[in-house]
Amino acid sequence: MIQISGYSLQFRRDEVNMIFVKYDNNLVKVYINDIKPVIITYEEIVNNPELFEYYMISVINTENIYKLDKDEKNKWCLSARIDNKRMFYSQFYDVIYSFKRNPLNQQEPKRISSEKKIKKFYKQFKLLLLSYEGDNFYFNLMPEKLSLFDDYLYKEFEFEIDIIEEDTRDYIDYKRNQRLDKVKNSLLKLYNIPDDLITKIKNI
């Protein structure tokens, strides 16, 4: 079954949206903003640590990876939680990308993009997303450099536990465990996850 997921990074004036459409033949169409999408294999995503982390977080934070809804302009909309300034993720889902035609109903691609297009994609990926790594406030507070995924878990689950009042701790712990279960279930549904990452997910 075709899956679609999205990651959105928003600053005051800048916005970067990354969309993954994963097909049954293990090819993935990847969009970054309005740049022409590239088609690569799922194995290539798994074997690229930075790209795979963005893919994982997109799956976790997308409202529904199997369905898109239409808006008042008759466009197909993808909703996800937003990464705000690399500081926190929004609590609610917002539309991060819209399509004139539903990508879930389109014919799956038969081959990957050319080497030239793939190189151009990675150049844009590094320019638009990896260049923001050092601007993360919480990231800079940590004694050791965190991976994107570890940083996501820290912001989602650890920081809020530190600041809550004692009488609300049990409730927050309950909600935290609910979200952790969703993270685990979302990630463990992915295909071809390396064994060491599966162990890490299960031990969250």
Image (tube, grey):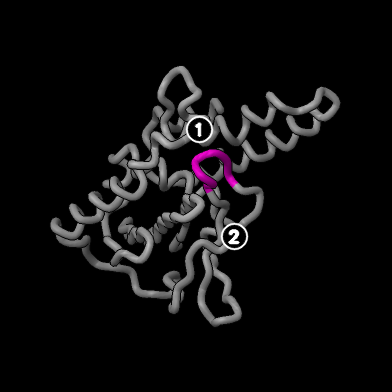
In the picture, the disc for residue 21 is none
Residue 69's x, y, as percent? 58, 71
Q: Which residues are magenta?
A: 83-89
**Is 104 displayed left or right of 116 in the figure?**
right
- Which of the two discs, 1 and 2, labels the residue nearer the N terminus? 2
- The furthest residue to the front: 13
Q: Quadrant of residue 198?
A: top left
Q: Position of residue 153 (x, y in %)?
A: 54, 33
Furthest-top residue in this view: 143
Residue drawn 30% across and 58% down?
27
Identified by mark 2, the residue type is Asp
Q: Residues within 10 Å of mark 2 (few under 14, many from 20)?
A: some
Please tell me whether mark 2 sits on a helix, a strand or a loop: strand
Residue 32 higher or lower than 54, as above or below: below
Q: Is residue 199 visible?
A: no
Please give the label number shown on residue 137.
Answer: 1
Instruction: Look at the image and tell me whether residue 40 can be seen.
Output: yes
